Image (cartoon, grey):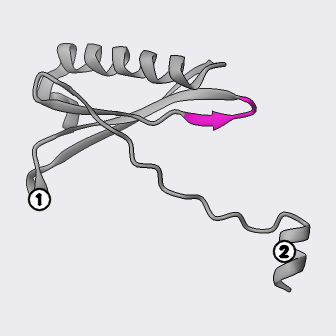
Amino acid sequence: MGWLSRLFGGSKEQKAVEVEPEEYKGYLIYAEPIAENGQYRIAGRITLGEGEEMKTHRFIRSDLLISEADAKELMLKKAQMLIDQMGESLFN
């Protein structure tokens, strides 16, 4: 059945992609746009701390852009704005 699955496009394994974080005021920002119908939805996560003390805030925006690079750039700007406006209350 393996060849049938390949022939008809059965389950495709998604490989985890390592995202290099951007540091901003002690926070790490991970731009992780989501491919959607030939466009990219702004998405990512903001972390603070390390190990068991690490706090994470994930977000997905409604914004769709044609370029993955543009989606990453806009995500970084939006994440920086969130950090500036909310600080650590972002994790509550």
Residue 5 is marked as 2
The residues colored magenta run: 34-38
| Residue at screen point 15% across, 29% down | 89
User: Residue 70 placed where, x, y %?
Assistant: 52, 16
Q: What residue type is labelled 1?
A: Glu
Residue 11 vs 30, above or below: the answer is below
Q: Quadrant of residue 58?
A: top left
Observer-nearest of 65 and 92: 65
The secondary structure type at the circle numbered 1 is: helix
| Residue 60: in magenta span | no
Residue 15 is marked as none
Give the CA separation, mark 2 to mark 1.
Answer: 41 Å
User: Residue 34 placed where, x, y %?
Assistant: 57, 37
Q: Is the magenta stretch mostly helix, strand or loop?
A: strand
| Residue at screen point 18% across, 45% down | 55
Residue 61 vs 48, above or below: the answer is above
Q: Quadrant of residue 11?
A: bottom right
Residue 42 vs 70, above or below: the answer is below
Q: Please identify the quadrant where the N terminus is shown.
A: bottom right
Q: Name the residue under label 1.
A: 52
Observer-nearest of 83 and 6: 6
Left or right of 92? Residue 7 is right
Observer-nearest of 72 and 59: 72
Please, which residue is most extreme toward the bottom here?
1
